[in-house]
Image (tube, rainbow, N blue to C red):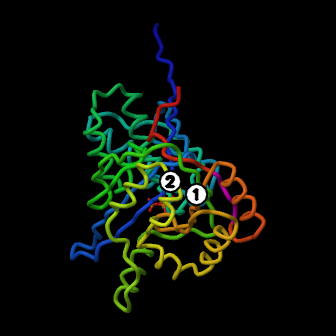
Amino acid sequence: MLSVVPTSLTVRAPAKVNLHLGVGDLRPDGFHELVTVFQALSLHDDVTLTPSDALTVRVTGEGVRDVPTDATNLAARAVAALAERYGRDPYLQIDIAKGIPVAGGMAGGSADAAAALLGAATLWGLDVGRDELDEVAATLGSDVPFSLHGHTALGTGRGERLIPALARGEFHWTLALAREGLSTPAVYRELDRLREVGDPPRAGSPDALLAAVASGDPHRLAPLLANDLQAAALSLQPGLRRTLRAGIEAGALAGIVSGSGPTCAFLCASADDAVDVGTELAGAGVCRTVRVASGPVPGATVVP
Ligand code: ATP
């Protein structure tokens, strides 16, 4: 009798940093219109899928205690959504090896969802095009389509409508990971509050920044990095000001809160500079730990 040997499949998905994040005013439907430029970085989660008799999740690595292992895990939701759409049983064991900080503004959950989508579609041999996968991705979260695509892209709508952006060369980053995470909805609420009582800075148009990314020159890109959520993240975690200052003093070209924070991303002139900045930051005691990364890198990819 023939028996089917369950085969595992691992998909690697990258973290992101928002080089530009312009947040529109709160809409009556509770959402904010975004204009953002994403870049995928060489910091990743690995998601391994194995056929099983139930949909289960195990998590190891960075920040495990804050990641749900029930049906609310974004990777499990991704598998369930794909199974429902294509009439499959969603029975997979999902093993997530986290390298992306949890609740760090680097789209870790979205990376896992994107990896799970691509992995399940591949494992089940689904005849599904990128457009269809994008559609399912957008229902799971506004960063999930970018986690599938990676590289550098302009995102509009809630960030889920993507146009690939030209990027020349490689940009070098040092990431300062914080001790405590920040909840993305709480940061948006804080921005709404700050805008009611004052006039925090607005990122404006990303055109000059897109030209700088295309030029490949980090010195040109550095002064153009902009994030409307930064004022709100700093208001909720004032200690991040010290982290940002310390990165600049250590020789970074620019520092910015990544997305909704609290990870601080420092653009550096070279890979060597990024290591030097990381060493100084680690010694300064202004963050939990540091990582060095480069971008752009591809989106979710099956590991051979
Ligand atoms: P973003 O940058 O997309 O706003 P983030 O990087 O700040 O998100 P995540 O790491 O995606 O934040 O986690 C946000 C919350 O989502 C976590 O606190 C956790 O409870 C929940 N979550 C669900 N599934 C996952 C997952 N697979 N990995 C991480 N967090 C998850």
Tag 2: Cα neighbours inside 10 Å, few (<14), some, or many (≥20)? many
Cβ of mark 2 under 8 A from ligand 1? yes
Q: Which mark is residue 101?
A: 1
Q: Is residue 178 left or right of residue 85?
A: right
Residue ID at (39%, 65%)? 21
Most frequent secondary structure within the magenta stretch: strand
Q: Is mark 1 within 8 Å of ligand 1?
A: yes
Q: Residue at x 56, y 62 (%)?
A: 265
Give the labeled residue for mark 2.
108
- Residue furthest toward the top? 1
Q: Which residues are magenta?
A: 288-292
Q: Percent from the top left, x then y, of residue 8? A: 52, 28
Quarter of the rendering containing residue 209:
bottom left
Query: Is label 2 in a helix, a strand or a loop?
Result: helix
Would you identify the image quadrant in which residue 136 lies? top left
Q: Name the kind of residue labelled 2 in the image.
A: Gly
